[in-house]
Image: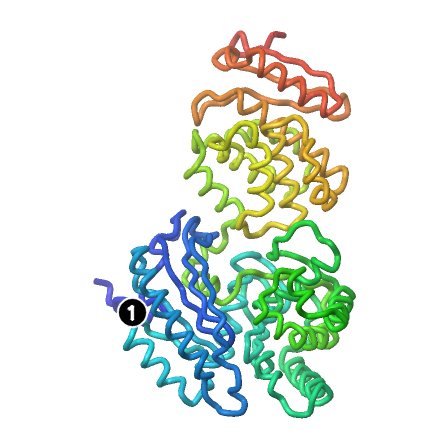
Amino acid sequence: MDGTPEPQPHDWGPFGRPLFNDASSRALSRVGVVDVGSNSVRLMVFDGAARSPAYFYNEKIMCALGAGMSKTGKLNPEGRMRALAAMRRFRHLADGMGISPLTAVATAAVREATDGPEFRAEVESETGIQLWVIDGEEEARLSAQGVLLGWPGSYGLVCDMGGSSMELAEISGGRVGRRISAQIGPLKLSSMKGGKKGRKAFIKQTLSDMAGHMGPQKNRLFLVGGSWRAFARIDMERLGYPLHVLHEYRMSPAAIRETAKYIADSDPDALRARASVSSSRMALVPLAAEVLKQVVKTFHPRDIAISSYGIREGMLYEQMPQQLRDRDPLIESCTYAEAKDARLPGFGRTLYTFIRPLFKSAPDHRRRIVKAACLLHDVSWRAHPDYRAEDCFDNATRANLGGLKHSERVFLGLALLHRYSNKRANARFAPLVSLIDEASLHQAEVLGKAMRFGAMLWPQKDASPGELRWFPKKKLLELRLTPEVEPLFGEVAQTRFQSLAATLDAQSRVTVARARRGYSAA
């Protein structure tokens, strides 16, 4: 013994146990988190890559625990019954999945209600689930860490709106800085006296006070919370945006103003149906829009991004050792998918090394997507051949992947489509293709056809498939094969190699190593 005390359950926060015993771990043992908010109660079960946890199960019940609290000081009685019923259900689900005990956190409504302690005791008595009540600053910190889980190295201002409160936190260099919480959620605003004029004055003054604490925050604004996601859905509907993935969706300050006006001028029921927003959520969106307009007016962010990651993901990030935090969530997720689903796990890295010369002048952010594509190039092999290309495109553009812009999703999807198909004739791809420029479109096709060819030279996992050399000024694509690989360069492989050369508008040359130091033309 070195005299260091053994870690106690409270040292691991709400989980009561370490989730990441090994900093080099690649997979996360399944874990369930319940978030008891002012508006909703949600169960989230995480699984998958340790650095990029995926949603194994996700269920939300709109309980409105915080409705009417500004008048009564107590939890909404109907919401309290619904929340307790939800917790009973979640406990049974957790038992069935073998993930008990659940970890549960409660935020503004439970921490502020006079009957909050009574509710906590009732939950624990009936379900055995212990509710950890966190204060506003801790809520802000965990939400910001959730953003860092999805956007490593990001910087800016995180704004998390719940039903009863709103939290702000600054992030920079992978760390959370100043943070503050205020009672400015839509459930709180809905029962405020003074009508729209009084509400507007309250919002303006509250945000002015928050800005005084936070200081200038003119970088990116990250929006966390269901009301913001509903707002983004409506912005997508207004613009006819083709990719309905909320995470990393971007809006400009001007778009915020236009969408807020669009919400105010629209019939709520018709708008709710068009944008696929629930009626309970839609009732709060106009109030959230008023707040968001003032947030933008107060802080002047250069752009606005939606984060699907928040407090629950932040709780996982809290436990990650720095070595794990420093990994790329996209590459980790793709590595996990390859290990689980590919026919020859590990060949993706070999393929990346083989085709990398085609992208030697590409910036780092593009080579990162090239590497992700190579890791994913074979994970959809079980799909029917007639639909495999389409399946690859759909998976890449809609998958739960962090650290991936919308344009990068489309690039990745197109590359994987061309891994299985020379052409993209399906008209339904056209709207999404409009999200990337012509140069990226061509590069995605080159990447896909390079993977399509490279996959033909499939020896053993750690064996080299040969060497590609690309001379862009000469417009020459050279393939160097070893004698061991030459038999794999059959008729189909030759056709695919020529297709790649044609896409590059290049001449091709194939050589085979006949001796230890030389190559001869094939």
Image vertical order of residue 233 relative to residue 28, above or below: below
Front residue of 12/433: it is: 433
Residue in view at x 47 percent, y 41 percent: 335
Where, quadrant-wise, is the N terminus in this rendering? bottom left
Front residue of 31/142: it is: 31
Residue kind at label 1, given as amino acid type: Pro
Mark 1 neighbour class, 10 Å CA radius: few under 14, some 14 to 19, many 20 or more: few
Residue 143 point in image, percent of width and height: 52, 68
Image vertical order of residue 291 relative to residue 420, above or below: below
On the image, which quarter does residue 224 sit in? bottom right
Front residue of 402/237: it is: 237
Residue 511 point in image, percent of width and height: 61, 11
On the image, which quarter does residue 289 sit in? bottom right
Which secondary structure lies at badge 1? helix
Residue in view at x 66 percent, y 62 percent: 232
Residue position marked by numbered label 1 in the rendering? 9
Residue 280 point in image, percent of width and height: 57, 71
Most extreme residue toward the left is: 1
Image vertical order of residue 407 relative to residue 108, above or below: above
Residue in view at x 71 percent, y 77 percent: 294
- The tally of labels here is 1
Where, quadrant-wise, is the C terminus in this rendering? top right
Residue 490 point in image, percent of width and height: 55, 11
Give left or right: position of 257 versus 88. right
Image vertical order of residue 467 relative to residue 99, above or below: above
